[in-house]
Amino acid sequence: MKGKTYLKVTPLHDLHKEAGARMVDFSGWEMPLYYTSIIDEHKVVRGSLGLFDVSHMGEIDIEGTDAQETIQRLTTNDIKRLKEEMIQYSVMCNNNGGIIDDLLVYMLARDHYMLCVNASNTEKDFNWIQENKVGDTRIRDMSRDISQIAIQGRNSEKILQILTDIDLSVIKYYRFRKGKIDGIDAIISRTGYTGEDGFEIYLDNTHSIRLWKSLLHIGAGFGIKPIGLGARDTLRIEMKYPLYGNDISEITSPIEAGMEWIVKLDKGDFIGKDAILREMKEGVKRKLVGFMMLEKGIARPHYKIYHKGIEIGEVTSGTFSPSLNKAIGIGYVDPDYSGIEEEIEIKIRGKRIKGEIVSTPFYPSQVRYN
């Protein structure tokens, strides 16, 4: 008889259950899917602000005189473009150009960085970095000690400012500050996974319950609510933000995924560069696109995509968009059929339902870039 599988939990787990959250297994973690409903929580974030527990995400500390060189070798973006208190979105690739993970790089100092990585990949990422580090590079997995709380929505700054002396208005998109929130030492990062203005806060586990409760109390007048992973998914799909394991993986390259903007070929050598160069020269065999359904039906991962009866690809993510009141999705298709307004069909429950490839993001970003 197989033993019972125990899921990991975040320090906020009991609060989620007390709030009546529907809990689910997400990458080995018991996490809230929703508290009221996915559509309601989605609209709360788009309309005002919502609070997310993302403490399952991984945090890896990289320090040493060769820390910068290690990250430069491991990631496709150019880490040397960063200054202190700046953040960079990037990917790590294997030797074949496949994506090991997508991540955020925080520059704490020239010889000190923090990587925020996907929960399901933390151990894999740590081992990969350890295997490929350069010279004086010290690596530490801090994930068990750090909680991450995200506050997202147009009123995020207004509410968070009440709890901190840091002038949040000077923190630009993809920038961060170290300071205190509600008297708690934290990293305050102007980032998010929703397309709304907002912040992601890193703090010691011992203080996460206190901050969570403070934010819910302070934000009550603005209709703040805790938000589950269900709405986090619909929000990110509206922005066409990729989800690791669905839209990107070790068998997809950043070029196929339309992530050329974070591949800096002029920065020098990095793992996967030769494979990416070869792919760019020869052309990709598939391309990640966004599509909208023209008939009733919701596309789900692994549903096949057709063009005039010919199979041309597969869905990787799909949902009903509460903001647009339409079914949308993401998938890989043959590049010959990847143009905007290209008519497609998705096979849903044995029937081919009409759709159309559209420009993305599906929903306009509300992020302030300066």
Image (spheres, helix red, strand yellow):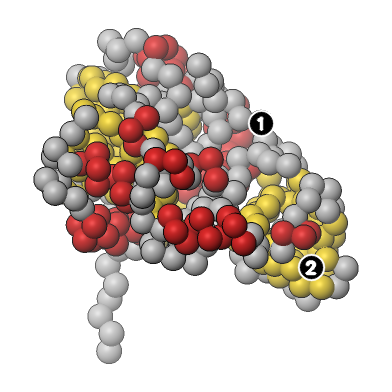
Q: Which of pointers 2 and 1 lies earlier in the amino acid sequence? A: 2
Where on the picture, by quarter, is residue 312?
bottom right
Q: Secondary structure at mark 1?
A: loop
Q: What is the CA distance from the residue labelled 2 to the residue labelled 1?
A: 28 Å
Query: Is residue 212 among what the camera can see?
Result: no
Residue 108's disc is none
x then y, percent, for residue 243: 50, 53
Query: Is residue 152 among what the camera can see?
Result: yes
The kind of residue on which mark 1 rests is: Pro
* Labelled pair 2, 1 in contact (Cβ < 8 Å): no
x then y, percent, for residue 21: 43, 49
Vertical placement of 140 versus 106: above or below? below
Within 10 Å of disc 2 (Cα), the crowding (few <14, some 14-19, many 20+) is many
Residue 364's disc is 1
Q: Answer with left or right where residue 221 lies relative to residue 267.
A: right
| Residue where numbered disc 2 is placed | 306
Q: Secondary structure at mark 2?
A: strand
Vertical placement of 304 versus 128: above or below? below
The kind of residue on which mark 2 rests is: Tyr
**Foreground of the two, 366 or 282:** 282
Within 10 Å of disc 1 (Cα), the crowding (few <14, some 14-19, many 20+) is few
Residue at screen point 46% across, 45% down:
265
**Foreground of the two, 186 or 333:** 333
Residue at screen point 33% across, 33% down:
80
Q: Answer with left or right where residue 337 lies relative to residue 216.
A: right
Q: Answer with left or right where residue 219 lies relative to residue 368.
A: left
